[in-house]
Image: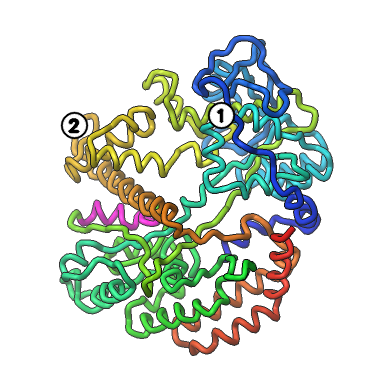
Amino acid sequence: MTDRWSRRAFAVLASLLLVIATACSSGGNNTGTADQPGNAGNNESAGEDRTAAEPGEPADPLGKYDPPIEVVAVRDLMAGSTEADMNDNIINQYYEKDLGIKLKYKWTVIGDQYEQRVNLTLASGDLPDMMVVNLRQLHQMIDAGQVEDLTAAWENYASDDLKQSLTANGMDSFEMATVDGKLYGIPLITPMVDTAHALFIREDWRQKLGLPEPKTYEDLEKIMYAFATQDPTGTGKKTYGLNITKDLYTNGFDITSFANMFHAYPNAWIEDESGNIVYGSVQPEMKEALAALQKLYKDGLIDKEFTVRDEGKAGEAVIKEQVGAFFGVQWTHWISGAGVDLYKKNLESDWKVYPIPSIDGTPAKVNVYNNTNSFLVVRKGFEHPEAGVKMLNWIHLMGHGPQPIPYEEWQELWANWGYAFLRPETIHANMQRWLNTFEALETGDTSKVEKNYLNKEQYEDIKAFVEQGDKMRKSNKEEDKEWAKVRWGWMLSGRVFQIADDYEKNGRLMIDKRGAYVSPAMLEKQATLSKLEQSTFTRIITGESSIDEFDKFVKEWENLGGKEITQELNEWAKK
């Protein structure tokens, strides 16, 4: 929880009041999917491209400017790069060759200095043609009249692929950037479904002990107790049934997913049966989940050291074969090496991922978050506001395919994709790529993976791993267990995406309603509330406090600002 709130501590009261007053008053954002003429893969249009198309007017998503135009931007430095590298690289060369865009950087800074440098730029008024800003900065620019209306640029120039990619999880992120029906920033989306968690089980232990698959909470409970009491390693060393950390709410080794089994949704703002937004951590279902965790801790299924263990240490416990189950996102088994290094260390070890089970007959829903907080903006008056949309079209085409260049040429280009000015996570098409790969493995039909070089590379690597396992060879024909462990890790990540897709198709996602919005009371009181929740829940789990402490916590949470924040969020949502 603390990490999620700290990431949003940038929000200031003035811009938030602006969001409340205007962003949601439009009732829409004119970002519908107007038909796009031609093929988005056609990047050879001759002649100067239209730059002031009215909504609905045909335009070429990848039309090349002739003569070329210059676009001045700013950005953070890639690790190990210089400002000269950022201005002269293969991606910039392709921008000019394919799009007729000469991209130059007004300035570049180390990543953690970027937000402060943008603040100074906004204050000075010496703006580049385009840049990426956060939600506060976006609305500051709107208020100051510094930012161009991108409604027509988005409607007319965004390719079908780009529109589908950036709106796959709904329009919430676009609504954040919309005021009075005008779109002022293109959200650089992090797909919500990518944050869905799965249950990781030490599968060789489960099979060795003759335990059921975790289809219900009762099944999982049997598994956790057996892992902690039946010596699954055969060494006599103490092992634990569940791996959690002191932070409670994290990307991996968390209690969020555990609570989801009890239909509790901590660390998220959810909609209740009456349509009101409420905080999941103070709902009655959370008390039941905490009581179950308290019992597991008391019975020795949770390591007493969890109160001082972070994600890194939790990952090390996996490598040391001290734990047999945990929850997490698709990269949890990469934290501190966790599962991937264990695979290399002990080839007999095996982890498998499962959907999160339920305490009863109603399938459990899982928390997911809209963490989008980066927006492409164009300075007011820039002649070619659609140029940024074209760069987004281009990078998505290069990630999704069918790529209009030879494979060898694409390989060099994609190895440097980090140099791209705009690079949202959607360019990797993580979920669809994995669904295509698994379908091809199961059916032998490779038609979908053949359309995308990135998908084809992934499929061929995974197919080789399925066939060869730890005997997998690199191109030099030498066995390399490091090579094999990475592919093992990829495959497990892919299985989590497969589970997440099933969650989405079956209505099992519980979406946090707050998104990137921060209310005025949150600025003042959220840190105190987060600390209260963290300490209270930890004391309950360890038995230092009784489960009845939860009821006292709820009242204290409300009195210290929780009730005020809830009211503000509901007022914002209604507007």
Mark 2, secondary structure of its residue: loop
Hey, what amino acid is under mark 1?
Answer: Ser
Question: What span is in magenta?
Answer: 332-346
N-terminal-most mark, 2 or 1:
1
Q: Residue 292: say if magenta.
A: no
Badge number at residue 439: none
Left or right of residue 238, residue 243 in this image: right
User: Which residue is rendered at x = 73% and y = 23% of the image?
Assistant: 52
Please give the label number shown on residue 159: 1
Is residue 250 at least partly visible in the picture? yes
- Check disc 2 and report the residue beneath it: 477
Estimate the spatial distance between the alpha carbons at disc 2 and disc 1, rounded to whole Å: 42 Å
Q: How far from the left and from the top, in percent, is residue 372?
A: 59, 49
The mark total stands at: 2
Image quarter in which the C terminus is found: bottom right
Q: What's the residue at 68%, 70% (across, down)?
A: 566
Does residue 334 appear in the picture of this structure? no
Rendered view: 25 above or below 521: above
Q: Nearer the viewer, residue 111 or 443?
A: 443
The residue lying at 37 percent from left, 21 percent from top is 408
Q: Residues within 10 Å of mark 1 (few under 14, many from 20)?
A: many
Residue 66 lies, in percent from the top left, at 65, 11
